[in-house]
């Protein structure tokens, strides 16, 4: 049988009061949040609108990310920021060298080691750098720990220690360092640690190839291909120890004479304090061999921090009037060889075009500090001696044949100093010239503590690609009058006609380039090179965008003082021609087998297109809502939209929250318009007063 038990009414009353209190709290928070949100939005919009006078504006709803200047168009000034050009590139290069040196200083760590032989007599530990970059020489320490035996003079005689690198792919032992002792020089160890240090090097089949190229100047495609595809073989470090351990026995003896009799002519020691006779009974061979199992794991390719530089391929030809044209810039580069032992920064004037001259400069230095752990043992660092050569090779059509165009060498003697080697390069072209390869080659010999000379090599390849000597459509004589026309508040029919003629002339040149892009696309299709097809297509698209920019420029110029986007469209058009030229160069390179150079040109083309689009005016929905329709009382479409939202909030608030919900819409309106007023009339002045920069 169910029995009804009435729930206490006072409990329901308490619960209702708690709900009411919670509701009021939530409602208060909602109102406060709405006020703050509306106020902040209004203030932000008001401030943005008030400061909008500083930004160029024209047709309703149009905007651009950047506003072009005369210098941007005539001198390519905006390229400086976009391509990260610098007036202090050389100082920056030395700063980067210092940072690189610090980052190369690797921790000295214990390598895993497997030992065979007299495990109970001595223990071997091998120490080396945590990071060995590329085909580098590296310091190594061998720590020998001898177990303590009784008596105290039960010595281990260390006769020789060998350490070497094992190419585990071939079994070859290389760069062997041997220490040997005899007579009174033999180390006698019992419970002691004995540390040796020297220099080893990873297996390397390319050092003498580089030496020949540096000494003879014969830098060719085979050398370049071998060095750029070189891979460090797997290797470990081997250790061999030849030693003997003294074996002693001891007997009780009451006197020295008794001990002498017990020894029977063998070497012996009598301890009168303990009445003990110690007799040397034998010398036991204590040979130990072993090798590391983790040395190769510490090798690495090119370190990320070594991949500095800003420029790729070349700066655009439209920068010929720029202040940067004669200033050295840091090019992106690829590094090969002994990356822990040597460092190079490649610099050049920014523009590289066939049949013109570019000035190159390489700043380079060795990194002897990498071998600091050896000073604690040997008291000195290894000695370097070197030759450094810049080689410039001309690449002939088809990409298979290279010819030396320029070369220059120097020698370093003081490795505490950075060296600079400059070379003006004339990119003299032939009918068959496709590109040039610029490379810096270093061959060093490191003299180890035993006098052994260890060869070290280094190659730096700047990511430069010499541009085809294609005529620039936007010549200075054509574009300067177009720029000057934008300064006129009143444009005459004669001005328009003159501008139209210049635009038509530029378009004729662009049409020629479009035809060349079509030819390259057909060639790439025949050769089945997808990248070539894409590059040629992108070139044509860029030239068409350049033509579109010219048409838009004319439309703006015809508006006179109301045509605010003329400079933007003109800069857009010029930048798009530059981008098209790099796409065209990429197509030429790839169809001649120069994939790397093609990629560098394509990368630069994308960079320039990105800059051009910053100037392209586009529809701005906020601008349209703010200025699109003139409404009474100074209202904008944004204000109307806020009023509609407030009305909707009022209706829904009343439906779900009752009378209190009706004020939510009013709260939004008060917050919005008060915030907008403060943003337009107060924030700008306040910020100006607070500025200290």
Image (cartoon, rainbow, N blue to C red):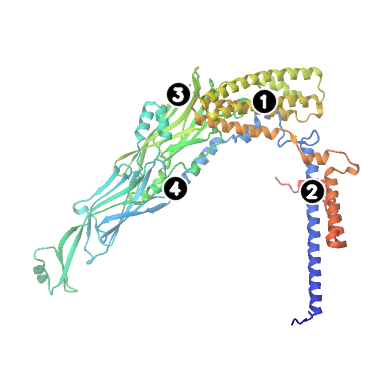
Residue at image position (15%, 61%) is: 282
Q: Position of residue 661 (x, y in %)?
A: 85, 60
298 vs 199, nearest the viewer: 298
Query: Residue placed at 79% from the left, 60% from the top?
Result: 30
Residue located beneath label 2 in the image? 683
Q: Which residue is mark 1?
A: 544
Lower sequence index among marks 2 and 1: 1
Q: Which residue is mark 4?
A: 105
Mark 3 touches mark 2? (CB < 8 Å): no
Q: Which numbered circle lies on residue 406?
A: 3
350 w.r.t. 235: above or below: above
Q: Earlier in the sequence, mark 2 or mark 4?
A: 4
452 or 470, which lies in front?
470
Crowding near pointer 1: few (<14 within 10 Å), some, many (20+)?
many
Q: Are marks 2 and 4 in contact (CB under 8 Å)?
A: no
| CA–CA distance in space, label 1 to label 4 | 52 Å
Q: Quadrant of residue 555?
A: top right
In this picture, residue 341 sits left or right of residue 61: left
């Amino acid at each position: 049988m169910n029995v009804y038990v009435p729930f206490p009414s006072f409990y329901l009353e308490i619960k209702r009061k708690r709900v009411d209190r919670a509701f009021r709290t939530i409602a208060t928070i909602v109102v406060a949040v709405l006020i703050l949100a509306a106020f902040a939005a209004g203030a932000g919009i008001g401030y943005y609108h008030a400061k909008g006078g500083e930004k160029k504006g024209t047709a309703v709803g149009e905007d651009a990310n950047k506003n072009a200047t005369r210098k941007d168009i005539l001198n390519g000034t905006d390229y400086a920021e976009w391509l990260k050009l610098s007036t202090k590139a050389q100082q920056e290069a030395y700063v980067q060298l210092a940072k690189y040196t610090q980052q190369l200083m690797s921790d000295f760590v214990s390598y895993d080691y497997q030992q065979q032989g007299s495990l109970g007599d001595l223990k071997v530990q091998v120490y080396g750098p945590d990071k060995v970059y590329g085909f580098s020489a590296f310091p190594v320490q061998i720590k020998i720990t001898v177990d303590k035996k009784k008596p105290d003079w039960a010595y281990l005689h260390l006769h020789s220690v060998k350490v070497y690198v094992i190419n585990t792919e071939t079994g070859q032992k290389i760069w062997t360092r041997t220490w040997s002792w005899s007579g009174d020089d033999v180390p006698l160890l019992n419970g002691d640690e004995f540390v040796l240090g020297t220099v080893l090097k990873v297996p390397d089949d390319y050092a003498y190839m580089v030496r020949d190229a540096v000494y003879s100047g014969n830098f060719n495609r085979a050398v370049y291909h071998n060095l750029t595809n070189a891979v460090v073989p797997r290797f470990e470090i081997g250790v061999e120890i030849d030693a003997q351990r003294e074996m002693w026995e001891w007997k009780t003896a009451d006197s020295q004479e008794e001990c002498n009799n017990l020894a029977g002519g063998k070497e012996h020691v009598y301890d009168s304090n303990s009445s003990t006779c110690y007799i040397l009974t034998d010398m036991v061979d204590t040979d130990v061999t072993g090798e590391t199992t983790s040395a190769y794991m510490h090798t690495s390719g090119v370190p990320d921090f070594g991949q500095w530089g800003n420029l790729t391929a070349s700066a655009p030809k439209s920068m010929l009037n720029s202040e940067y044209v004669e200033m050295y810039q840091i090019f992106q580069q690829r590094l090969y060889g002994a990356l822990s032992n040597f460092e190079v920064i490649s610099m050049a004037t920014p523009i590289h075009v066939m049949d013109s001259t570019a000035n190159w400069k390489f700043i380079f230095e060795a990194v002897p500090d990498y071998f600091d752990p050896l000073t604690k043992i040997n008291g000195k660092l290894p000695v370097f001696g070197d030759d450094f050569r810049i080689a410039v090779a001309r690449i002939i059509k088809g990409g298979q044949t290279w010819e030396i165009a320029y070369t220059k060498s120097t020698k370093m003697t003081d490795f505490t100093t950075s060296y600079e080697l400059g070379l003006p390069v004339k990119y003299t072209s032939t009918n068959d010239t496709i590109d040039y390869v610029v490379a810096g080659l270093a061959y060093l010999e490191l003299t180890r503590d035993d006098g052994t000379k260890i060869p070290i090599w280094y190659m730096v390849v700047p990511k430069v690609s010499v541009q085809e000597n294609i005529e620039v459509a936007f010549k200075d004589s054509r574009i300067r009058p177009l720029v000057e026309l934008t300064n006129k508040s009143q444009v005459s029919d004669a001005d328009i006609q003159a501008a139209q003629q210049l635009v038509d002339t530029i378009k004729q040149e662009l049409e020629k380039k479009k035809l060349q892009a079509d030819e390259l696309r057909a060639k790439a299709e025949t050769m089945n090179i997808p990248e070539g097809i894409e590059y040629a297509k992108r070139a044509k698209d860029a030239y068409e965008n350049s033509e579109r920019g010219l048409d838009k420029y004319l439309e703006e110029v015809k508006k006179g003082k109301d045509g605010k986007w003329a400079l933007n469209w003109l800069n857009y058009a010029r930048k798009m021609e530059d981008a098209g030229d790099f796409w065209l160069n990429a197509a030429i390179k790839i169809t001649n087998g120069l994939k790397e150079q093609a990629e560098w040109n394509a990368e630069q083309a994308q960079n320039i297109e990105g800059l051009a689009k910053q100037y392209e005016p586009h529809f701005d929905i906020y601008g349209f809502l703010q200025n699109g329709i003139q409404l009474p009382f100074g209202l904008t479409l944004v204000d109307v939209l806020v009023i509609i939202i407030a009305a909707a909030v009022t209706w829904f608030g009343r439906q779900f929250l009752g009378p209190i919900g009706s004020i939510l819409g009013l709260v939004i309106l008060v917050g919005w318009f008060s915030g907008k007023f403060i943003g337009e009339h107060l924030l700008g002045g306040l910020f100006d007063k607070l500025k200290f920069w």
